[in-house]
Amino acid sequence: MKKVFLALLTTSLFLVSCGSEEKKEEKKGKKEEKKEQAENCPVKIDTENIKVGFTAYKFAEPNKKGVDGRFEEISVAGAMASEDPLQALNGISFEIPVSSLYTGDPARDKKIKESFFGTMVATEMLTGSVKSVEGENVVIELKMNEIAFEIQATQIIDGETISLNAEINTDNWNGQDAIAALNKVCEANHKAPEGGESVLWPTVTLKIEGKLIKDCQ
């Protein structure tokens, strides 16, 4: 009788132990499933944290030199969540007030706003949209001087950071008069220390940077 009791006790303990292990494994499995679902959340662009920078160029060759600046305000609409981070920019539209231009030199900022953008038509606001995204290649339509022109950009994703890089030529927006007007008021500053003619290049490098955020439902 004693042996039977011990056998039953051992069996009960074994069953209880197995039941506990099964529950632990079940809980662990649910946690891992939730974690996997969180990691697979779609992402979207954080519209509140986008930086728009540019580099313009002055001086004649071989002394060509870049001058950096940025727009401190940008309004973005149409951001949609996507399973593919490379598609996070697809379909968005934007507005950039020219008044938010900043280069670190108030006198230069004033000349750019008045002589460059001021020579153009209806450039209080730069507007545009992302027309297509194919992998790293992004097509952006930018409207300036009442001309909408498509530019090619390359996007790079590094963790939560998404960057867009593009080279534009202001001639595509009939910017020749605007370049000439700005070069005239900045003539002394556009001559290299080594001498030569005053030059302001029509080419500009754009760099846009933003953050990707998870949009879990």
Image: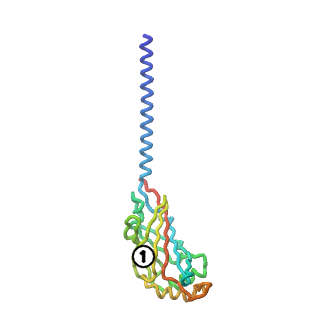
Q: Position of residue 174 (x, y in %)?
A: 43, 85
Camera-side residue: 193 or 23? Answer: 193
**Residue 217 against residue 129 in the figure, above or below:** above
Left or right of 106 on screen, residue 44: left
Q: Position of residue 86 (x, y in %)?
A: 41, 62
**Residue 185 against residue 71 in the figure, above or below:** below
Total residue callouts: 1
Residue found at the very far top of the displayed protein = 1
Q: Position of residue 213 (x, y in %)?
A: 47, 58
Quadrant hosting residue 66: bottom right
The amino acid marked with disc number 1 is Leu
Determine the residue positioned at 43% across, 58% down.
43
Instruction: For mark 1, give the secondary structure.
Output: strand
Q: What is the quadrant of the N terminus in the image?
A: top left
**Residue 153 against residue 106 in the figure, above or below:** above
Residue found at the very far right of the displayed protein = 193
Residue under label 1? 142
Left or right of 29 on screen, residue 106: right
Q: Position of residue 101 (x, y in %)?
A: 54, 76
> Mark 1 packing: few (<14 Cα in 10 Å), some, or many (20+)?
many
**Residue 89 against residue 9 in the figure, above or below:** below
Query: How is the structure coloured here?
Result: rainbow
Camera-side residue: 213 or 63? Answer: 63
Quadrant hosting residue 198: bottom right
